[in-house]
């Protein structure tokens, strides 16, 4: 295959025009193109009058070596694809099934690979299957009655299930894991376009279906699930895992499950699990993260700024990514930007409010939203120990709950700066899932974080005009940007106790759907290099 990079075409181009451009670039006739595959598609909007798609294309032709000799240029080369290889060769026999605690992206992909290669994992999920979970979440948004076990944070699929479903990552992928994740998503119902889009997303609606299909495949391979089941303790003997103790959230029944191996893929909001691990002597440390507020703008404003008016009418709702470094040493940046999306009440504990953003696959909501967040470090937490960041989060979420009288508090940016309570929206209304009311968000954070947030908003307006408009809608609090804890692990991916594998975002080793899924794959690989799958004693 010959790879062509930086192949540029208008956003209105046809398939025939793409084929013609491929042939012209390679200086061959169109009929000489046997086949082609789009490897990457991005948008070049630097010139608003000529917004273009830019492609990387792999092309199959006869006599590829001759074609390459005739055509010179950095944009043309022989395609070199890294194919993912799952390692085999572990010899140690497992007496019991491996247990995966949590079914978010990290736990899901770890379970998927282990099941595919004969390890028959048991997945413990404190929440409900995604079908029931969706109904519980919708009920919460409508009635404000929180189920602490099944909500936006907890349940099959993890927190990413109710998000924009972004599938891009900054993780360098030298082993083909990124493509493997996308291929698995596509195999189970995601659109083919995610395999080549520069900023792929799947949407919360499609993601729910994909998760169900992956579960069915895991079960077909011999894996099994216990829903409504929370791991409450780990029994350790002589430095080795012996038993996972769990409780059914519906009946209260306690189960003691013997195992030599458990994957901790608990997510960034499993605060009770973090406390249990600290009590059990697991090595953990507080880590930096970021806090802030959800901001909403009209999507037409964002799309026209990013693409120009004409292109904005053709292309999907535009995203943005913005960042600034302030003189006080803090960073301010956008996080989990949701084009055509909704702000959502993402709370998981009674008496506390946390927000997030969510988009459907069509991204056809009226507003764009993202979290604008300010970096915080353990010095800001006002306490010591590995769980100091958890307590800092809780203090902000409790205050947000009070400011909104149990609902999501909102405020217009102009009023936020003036420290004045808002009483109505400006030229556009909020697109939000969950009960909400106006509240004094300017009272939520320490003064330095408030000032940093405002500075960031004004700096961002230099790149996106009117980003700091007075009627920008703020909702809070955005506190679950990443885990406040890191559970340390060694080069074999185990904790200080043998057989326990900290994994994914909750353990402090990922930051989104893709990086969490890839970390879950790493854990599955580490297990397969040590243990033998397919014919363990518990399968005989």
Image (tube, helix red, strand yellow):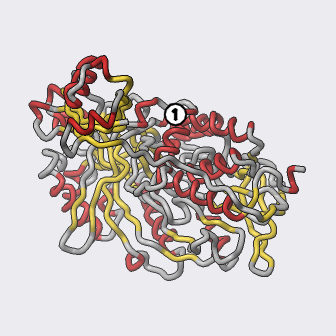
Q: Pointer 1: residues within 10 angstroms few (<14), some, or many (20+)?
A: some
Question: Residue, x 84% and y 58% (percent of image)?
Answer: 255
Query: Which residue is the site of mark 1?
Result: 186
Quarter of the figure with residue 511:
bottom left
Question: Residue, x 56% and y 33% (percent of image)?
Answer: 187
Horizontal relation, residue 438 to residue 103: left or right = left
> Residue 364: in sight, yes or no?
no
- Depth check, front residue: 411 or 524: 524
Compared with 497, 196 (above or below) is above
Q: Looking at the picture, how far across and down is residue 104, in whole percent? A: 58, 50
Q: Looking at the picture, how far across and down is residue 161, in whole percent? A: 52, 42
Q: In which quarter of the image is the N terminus?
A: top left
Q: Looking at the picture, how far across and down is residue 38, in whole percent? A: 36, 32
Horizontal relation, residue 451 to residue 291: left or right = left
- Depth check, front residue: 166 or 84: 84
Compared with 385, 323 (above or below) is above
Compared with 254, 66 (above or below) is above
Compared with 295, 247 (above or below) is below
Question: Residue, x 36% and y 63% (percent of image)?
Answer: 444
Q: Looking at the picture, how far across and down is residue 456, in whole percent? A: 21, 59
């Amino acid at each position: 295959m010959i790879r062509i990079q930086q192949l540029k075409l208008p956003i209105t181009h046809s398939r025939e025009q793409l084929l013609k451009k491929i042939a012209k670039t390679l200086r061959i006739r169109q009929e000489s193109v046997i086949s082609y595959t789009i490897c990457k598609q991005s948008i070049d909007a630097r010139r608003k009058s000529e917004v273009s798609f830019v492609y990387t294309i792999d092309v199959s032709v006869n006599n590829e070596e001759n074609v390459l000799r005739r055509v010179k240029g950095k944009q043309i080369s022989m395609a070199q694809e890294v194919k993912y290889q799952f390692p085999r060769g572990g010899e140690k026999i497992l007496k019991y099934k491996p247990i995966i605690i949590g079914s978010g992206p990290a736990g899901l992909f770890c379970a998927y690979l282990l099941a595919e290669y004969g390890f028959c994992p048991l997945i413990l999920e404190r929440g409900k299957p995604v079908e029931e979970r969706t109904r519980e979440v919708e009920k919460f948004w409508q009635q404000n009655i929180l189920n602490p076990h099944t909500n936006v944070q907890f349940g099959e699929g993890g927190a990413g299930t109710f998000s924009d479903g972004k599938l891009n990552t900054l993780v360098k992928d030298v082993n083909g894991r990124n493509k493997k994740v996308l291929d698995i998503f596509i195999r189970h119902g995601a659109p083919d376009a995610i395999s080549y889009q520069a900023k792929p997303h799947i949407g919360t609606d499609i993601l729910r279906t994909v998760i169900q299909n992956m579960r069915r495949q895991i079960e077909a391979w011999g894996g099994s699930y216990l829903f409504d089941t929370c791991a409450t303790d780990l029994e350790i003997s002589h430095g080795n895992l012996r038993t996972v103790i769990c409780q059914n959230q519906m009946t209260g029944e306690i189960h003691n499950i013997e195992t030599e191996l458990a994957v901790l893929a608990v997510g960034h909001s499993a605060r009770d699990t973090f406390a249990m691990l600290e009590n059990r002597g697991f090595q953990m440390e507080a880590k930096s993260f970021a806090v802030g507020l959800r901001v909403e703008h009209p999507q037409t404003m964002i799309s026209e700024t990013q693409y120009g008016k004409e292109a904005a009418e053709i292309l999907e709702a535009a995203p943005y990514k913005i960042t600034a470094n302030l003189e006080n040493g803090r960073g301010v940046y956008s996080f989990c930007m949701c084009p055509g999306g909704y702000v959502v009440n993402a709370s998981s504990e009674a008496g506390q409010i946390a927000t997030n953003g969510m988009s459907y696959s069509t991204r056809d909501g009226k507003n764009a939203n993202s979290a604008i967040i300010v970096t915080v470090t353990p010095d800001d937490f006002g306490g010591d120990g590995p769980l100091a960041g958890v307590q800092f989060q809780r203090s902000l979420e409790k205050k947000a709950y009070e400011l909104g009288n149990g609902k999501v508090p909102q405020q217009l940016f102009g009023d936020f700066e003036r420290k004045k309570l808002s009483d109505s929206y400006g030229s556009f209304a909020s697109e939000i899932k969950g009960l909400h009311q106006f509240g004094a968000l300017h009272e939520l954070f320490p003064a330095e974080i408030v000032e940093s947030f405002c500075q960031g908003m004004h700096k961002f307006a230099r790149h996106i005009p009117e980003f700091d408009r007075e009627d920008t809608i703020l909702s809070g609090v955005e506190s679950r940007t990443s885990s406040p804890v890191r559970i340390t692990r060694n080069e074999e991916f185990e904790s200080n106790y043998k057989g326990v594998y900290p994994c994914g975002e909750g353990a402090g080793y990922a930051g989104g759907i893709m990086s969490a899924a890839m970390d879950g794959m790493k854990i599955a690989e580490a297990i397969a290099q040590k243990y033998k799958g397919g014919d363990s004693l518990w399968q005989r």
